Image (tube, rainbow, N blue to C red):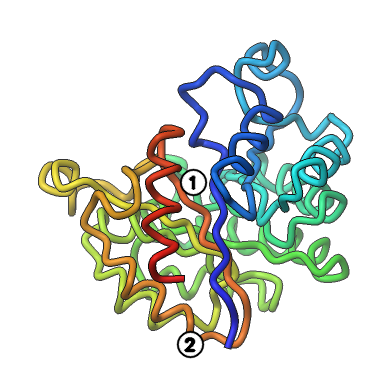
Amino acid sequence: MGKILLGVNMEYIRSEDKPFEWGVAKAAELGYQFVEPMVHWGRELLSEAGYFHSVSMWDDPYRIRRECEKYNINASALSAHCPLCKPDASTDYLKQAVRFAAEIGAGVVCTDAGPKQFWSTQNEDFAFMKYVLKEASLVAEPRGIKIGIEPHQQYTVIPDLYDQIIGLAGSSAVGANFDTGNSYLAGQDPYLWLEKIKGKLVHLHAKDISVQQSDTERGTVTGTPVGCACGDGVIDWEKIVAICKTLPKDIVFSVECGTVEQAAKSIEHLRKFV
């Protein structure tokens, strides 16, 4: 039986106007074992000026590794979301993210199907996604990196289509980065769905949804950027933990919330069960 380990997605400092390094130090202070850095192509003003947490893949990946080692914390995954339905935007990006993850020591690269082109059919989109995932898996397999696909867009929030997408490349390097909040908001039962795909699970986004957001958006959206503090919303974390504890491997719960205060409340709540 594996362990449930607690991490935090760096989106928790989005509203703080602080750099990556500040977020790592704060995560360690709060007691998290892992962080989930976000990466991007090229250069952009806010990150370069130290007002945003995203890290450029043009930087030395050891920038992330050294900062995590400084605070005795690890990177559970890279948040490298790119639209799999758009090969021109995602193929090279995802391959570079895999290489970046390998140098950092993160075992997972998280991504999703992304917004589709308005003109493409479902069959065309699946062909696009197969191409991207096959190319990325050929880079991921020899490096021991997993590609975790998240339920977040039009195809991935439908359980049967989600399974099909994970299997498109025919590679054990592609698995599930299950998002509790997105699956719930899409109108699915997150517990039944997690139970069904737990054998493919490589990472989990621990996202709670407030009662207010549930009342106004459930069944009308395919996801949300961040949730509320774990324990303040509608997700039954004792049940989520119980399902994941049956797995033979360790799984990181990467908390997705919007503030430092919510991150602090989340870890205190999740510790009751893990």
Residue 267 x %, y % = 45, 53
The extreme left residue here reads 215
The amino acid on which the numbered mark 1 sits, given as a three-letter code, is Gly
Any part of residue 63 in sight: yes
Residue at the disc numbered 1 = 114
Q: Is residue 23 left or right of residue 67?
A: left
Query: Which comes sooner in the sequence, label 2 or label 1?
Result: 1
Q: Quadrant of residue 33?
A: bottom right
Residue at the disc numbered 2 = 246
| 103, 12: nearer the viewer | 12
Q: Is residue 31 left or right of residue 164?
A: right
Q: Residues within 10 Å of mark 2 (few under 14, many from 20)?
A: some
The residue located at (25%, 49%) in the rendering is: 232
Query: Eyeballing the image, is 61 above or below 244?
Result: above
Residue 112 x %, y % = 52, 53
Secondary structure of residue under mark 1: loop
Q: Is residue 24 left or right of residue 183?
A: right
